[in-house]
Image (spheres, rainbow, N blue to C red):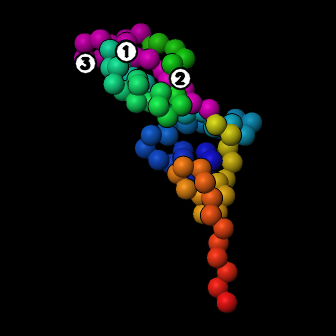
């Protein structure tokens, strides 16, 4: 699924190692709304970067990570994970 999802705005930046796609986000530590938003998509806080932001208060950032298998999605895949069979035209 990484082949499809890594190209969308929420799924970048990323890197691929051993058929796993690692995706990262940086979120200001006091931005609870953003942290919760990314957690809904399977991201987890894995680290805190001190002084990540330079020109705003609360300069620290959480690093959120999401890891998925780097597989090409099946034909006719939907965002909910269900697939359809292609109809044969006669």
Q: What label does residue 3 carry, if any?
A: none
Asked whether the viewer can see residue 34, the reply is: yes
Marks 1 and 3 close (CB-CB < 8 Å): no
Marks 1 and 2 close (CB-CB < 8 Å): no
Image depth: mark 1 or mark 3 in front: 1
Does the magenta segment cover residue 66?
yes
In whole angstroms, how far apart are the C-alphas of marks 3 and 2?
26 Å
Q: Earlier in the sequence, mark 1 or mark 2?
A: 1
Characterize the local packing of mark 3: few (<14), some (14-19) or many (20 or more) Cα atoms within 10 angstroms: few
In whole angstroms, how far apart are the C-alphas of marks 1 and 3?
15 Å
Does the magenta segment cover residue 16?
no
Query: What residue is shown with label 2?
Result: 44
Q: What stretch is highlighted in magenta?
A: 50-67
The total of numbered circles placed on residues is 3
Image depth: mark 3 or mark 2 in front: 2
Predominant SS of the magenta segment = loop
Characterize the local packing of mark 2: few (<14), some (14-19) or many (20 or more) Cα atoms within 10 angstroms: some
Residue 43 location (% of width, % of height): 52, 28
Residue 59 location (% of width, % of height): 32, 13
Query: What residue is shown with label 1?
Result: 29
Mark 1: secondary structure: loop
Rendered residue at 65%/72% (across/down): 86
Query: What residue is shown with label 3?
Result: 55
Residue 10 vertical placement versus 81 (above, below)? above
Marks 3 and 2 close (CB-CB < 8 Å): no
Residue 32 location (% of width, % of height): 35, 19
Q: Which of 40 and 4 is in front in this view?
A: 40
Rendered residue at 67%/43% (across/down): 70
In whole angstroms, how far apart are the C-alphas of marks 1 and 2?
13 Å
């Amino acid at each position: 699924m990484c082949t499809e999802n890594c190209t969308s705005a929420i799924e970048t930046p990323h890197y691929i190692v051993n058929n796993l796609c690692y995706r990262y986000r940086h979120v200001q530590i006091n931005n609870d709304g953003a942290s919760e938003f990314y957690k809904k998509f399977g991201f987890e806080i894995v680290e805190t970067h001190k002084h990540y932001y330079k020109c705003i208060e609360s300069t620290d950032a959480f690093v959120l990570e999401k890891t998925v298998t780097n597989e090409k999605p099946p034909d006719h895949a939907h965002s909910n994970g269900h697939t359809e069979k292609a109809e044969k035209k006669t």
